[in-house]
Image (tube, grey):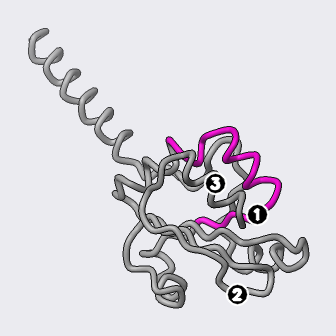
Amino acid sequence: MKKYIFIVAVISLLALTSAVYSLDFDDTQIQGLNVTTDIDGAFNASQSENKTLAIIFDQDSCVYCDILKENVLSDVNVQNELNENFIVLLVDINKNPEIAQKYNVYGTPTIQFLDSNGNDVNRIEGCPETDEFLNIVKEI
């Protein structure tokens, strides 16, 4: 009987652990980087603050999006440059397909840079190295 209770307890613990790991956590925030998912707010802030808008298009289960967030966007120098000179908008292409279509985004990660008037400034497709990304944003 004790063996049966132990087995049930282990199975229950494994099921609980699996359920916790399968939860959809909000990974839209990157510690140290001012990021928004509010599309209208980002466009308004870009205009009112006269800052370039950096739209980061990503999606769930995108390995390169995760690499971009973990290795490039988490870099202190990248964060300082983006926080000081850009409004950063994170757009999930599956949740906002109309925005992705408007900017012809079919793969992720893609970073579209727009001036405060909404004009294209630059675009990065894929996941660049940190130094390459930093050089691009400093030139904008």
**Mark 2 surroundings: few (<14), some (14-19) or many (≥20) residues within 10 A:** few
Residue 85 among those drawn in magenta: yes
What residue sits right under mark 1 in the picture?
A: 86
What's the distance in space between the residues labelled 2 and 1, CA to CA?
Answer: 14 Å
Q: Quadrant of the C terminus?
A: bottom right
Report the disc number at residue 119: 2
**Residue at the spot x=13%, y=9% of the render?**
2
Residue range of the region highlighted in magenta in the rendering: 71-90
Contact (Cβ within 8 Å) of mark 3 with mark 2: no
Residue 66 at x, y = what percent?
Answer: 43, 50
Residue 43 at x, y = what percent?
Answer: 75, 79
Q: Residue furthest right?
A: 48
Q: Identify residue type, mark 2.
A: Asn
Helix, strand or loop at mark 1: strand
Q: Identify residue type, mark 3.
A: Asn
Q: Quadrant of the N terminus?
A: top left
Foreground: 77 or 57? 77
